[in-house]
């Protein structure tokens, strides 16, 4: 086992890796930008190293500085978390050439699966079903129109190096091909530095189902079962579950075998995720492989009992997987991504200072957060503040538990997605599991039109007034951390009745 691991990330995922290290008896090193000097992950690590200014291009994307920090602190391995440099093959090589262990897949596997067209070729060669489409990048709009005519509209234009919905456009008519291709290329160029794209058939109303895999250095590849990731807005996941209500044990077995085959074909090791489209007839198609830890990994952890992050570290240190070849999920888990976005205002980013935070607790509730009271939320990084995850004996209990946990959550100071998640948990179609990738986009106007109950609005007004009073006290020199018992009780009571969250 390693003695010291550097965590090349920030926020909740950095804290998640630091905690995994601590349980393994491994020291941790945090890196931070100027914007994160007082961030929780900096304080919680055993050591911390400044790597640059607030913009990620000047800090968290500076691979050379991160490797220098690892050497300076005596770290033997680097965990990239997700995002930033986690799927950059050049960074994996940089780490390896520096004599350090990269806690992730080999750079060659990142290259094989990181490019969507290359991944489609590899999967097709291995006999894995893929969505009908091209395995080569398209040169221009004329070629794209010809391909679309062959497969039939609608089609999907996708960036070869894409992810998170960037560089992706649905095209339903030949006249839309050229402007859609230009927009997709421009977005892909800006996001990934690569404008190459391809065309695939657009499948109507599928589910987005993914399989979590673990692969060690001793030839064992393990499927941990599926996650339902269909609740998406603009191709960005917002709510995830494990298992999926539409997946039978037999289908789970077949999808797991397919994911394992794709993992072996890529020479993959460590944790990864194979993403599939599942149509209404039970047919599934390989989409891509995410060559990193996924944001939604906690739901798989809760239904399998396997600490995926710890096993990432163990695998990188040379340990062999001791688990059975096939996992049967136990109970049901749901994750809501709590973001600093305002659903009532088109999900525009919300910035400011976290004035007060009350984290839900109780049976089956897990909070993976990267914020605390006093944290400043800016525009430099992703808007995700935390993940709220629950476990229940079945889906009905998990939904009820998530609703209760969301009801307890209090975040004062910035607008968040909390109210949106509550409305989804209350939606009858969602409760019945009647969802697909397009479901949220079609229901979003209705969900956002549902007004907050009167008591929520009243509590919000009370909490806002108390915050203003506290600010006045601060300007007068009073100690805002020591309110009178009456005022403190009123503040907490108002906030806990669903105040400004």
Image: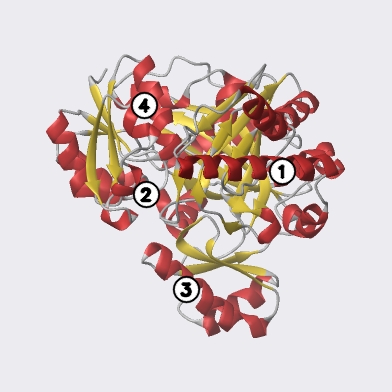
Query: Where does residue 229 sit, x and y in percent of width and height?
Result: 64, 43
The answer to whether marks 1 and 4 mark residues whose Cβ atoms lie closer than 8 Å is no
Instruction: Determine which of the numbered discs, if any, sits on residue 18 in the image.
Output: 4
Instruction: Determine which of the numbered discs, if any, sits on residue 185 in the image.
Output: 3
- Find the distance from the CA under tag 3 to the CA under tag 1: 43 Å
Where does label 1 land, which residue?
Answer: 460
- Find the distance from the CA under tag 3 to the CA under tag 4: 38 Å
Label 1 residue SS: helix
The answer to whether marks 2 and 3 mark residues whose Cβ atoms lie closer than 8 Å is no
Decide which of tag 1 and tag 4 comes sooner along the chain. Answer: 4
Q: Quadrant of residue 14?
A: top left
On the question of residue 126 being in view, the answer is: no
Q: Which of marks 2 and 3 is in front?
A: 2
Query: Where does residue 64 sit, x and y in percent of width and height?
Result: 18, 48
| 494 displayed left or right of 197 | right
| 195 displayed left or right of 472 | left
Q: Nearer the viewer, residue 232 or 403?
A: 403
Decide which of tag 3 and tag 4 comes sooner along the chain. Answer: 4
Q: How crowded is mark 3: few (under 14 residues within 10 Å), some or many (20 or more)?
A: many
Q: Residues within 10 Å of mark 1 (few under 14, many from 20)?
A: many
Q: Which of 387 and 133 is in front in this view?
A: 387
Where 240 falls versus 177 (above or below)? above
Instruction: Determine which of the numbered discs, if any, sits on residue 84 in the image.
Output: 2
The answer to whether marks 3 and 1 mark residues whose Cβ atoms lie closer than 8 Å is no
- Find the distance from the CA under tag 1 to the CA under tag 4: 35 Å
Quick one: quadrant of the N terminus?
top left
Q: Which of 76 and 41 is in front in this view?
A: 41
Where 239 falls versus 236 (above or below)? above
């Amino acid at each position: 086992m390693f003695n010291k691991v550097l965590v090349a990330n920030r926020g909740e995922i950095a804290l998640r890796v630091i905690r995994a290290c601590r349980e393994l008896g491994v020291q941790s090193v945090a890196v931070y930008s100027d914007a994160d000097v007082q961030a929780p992950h900096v304080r919680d690590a055993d050591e911390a190293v400044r790597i640059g200014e607030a913009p990620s291009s000047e800090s968290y994307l500076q691979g050379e500085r991160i490797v220098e920090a690892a050497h300076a602190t005596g770290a033997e391995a680097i965990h990239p978390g997700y995002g930033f440099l986690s799927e950059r093959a050049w960074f994996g090589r940089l780490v390896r050439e520096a004599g350090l262990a990269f806690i992730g897949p080999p750079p060659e596997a990142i290259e094989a699966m990181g490019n969507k067209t290359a991944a489609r070729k590899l999967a097709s060669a291995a006999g894995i079903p893929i969505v009908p489409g091209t395995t080569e990048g398209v040169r221009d709009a004329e070629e794209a129109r010809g391909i679309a005519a062959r497969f039939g509209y609608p089609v999907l234009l996708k960036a070869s190096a894409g992810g998170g919905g960037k560089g992706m456009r649905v095209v339903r008519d030949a006249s839309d091909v050229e402007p859609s291709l230009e927009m997709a290329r421009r977005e892909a160029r800006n996001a990934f530095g690569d404008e190459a794209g391809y065309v695939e058939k657009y499948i109507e109303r599928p589910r987005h189902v993914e399989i979590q895999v673990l692969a060690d250095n001793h030839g064992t590849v393990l499927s941990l079962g599926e996650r339902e990731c269909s609740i998406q807005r603009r191709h960005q996941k917002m709510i995830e579950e494990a298992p999926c209500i539409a997946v039978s044990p037999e289908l789970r077995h077949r999808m797991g075998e397919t994911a394992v085959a794709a993992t072996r074909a890529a020479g993959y090791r460590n944790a990864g995720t194979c993403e599939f489209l599942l149509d209404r007839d039970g047919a599934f198609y390989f989409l891509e492989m995410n060559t990193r830890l996924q944001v939604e990994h906690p739901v798989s952890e809760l239904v399998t009992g396997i600490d995926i992050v710890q096993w990432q570290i163990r695998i990188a240190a040379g340990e062999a997987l001791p688990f059975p070849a096939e996992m049967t999920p136990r109970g049901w888990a749901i994750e809501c991504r709590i973001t600093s976005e305002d659903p009532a205002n088109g999900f525009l980013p919300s910035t400011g200072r976290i004035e007060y935070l009350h984290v839900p607790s109780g049976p089956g509730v897990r909070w993976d957060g990267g914020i605390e009271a006093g944290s400043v939320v800016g525009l430099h990084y992703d808007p995700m503040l935390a993940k709220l995850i629950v476990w229940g004996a079945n889906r009905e209990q998990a939904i009820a538990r998530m609703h209760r946990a969301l009801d307890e959550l209090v975040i004062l100071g910035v607008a968040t997605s909390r109210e949106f998640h509550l409305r989804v948990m209350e939606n009858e179609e969602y409760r019945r599991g009647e969802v697909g990738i397009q479901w949220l986009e079609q229901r979003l106007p209705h969900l956002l039109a549902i007004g907050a109950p009167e008591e929520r609005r009243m509590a919000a007004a009370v909490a806002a007034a108390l915050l203003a009073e506290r600010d006045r006290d601060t300007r007068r020199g009073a100690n805002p951390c020591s309110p009178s018992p009456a005022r403190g009780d009123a503040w907490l009571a108002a906030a806990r009745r669903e105040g400004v969250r």
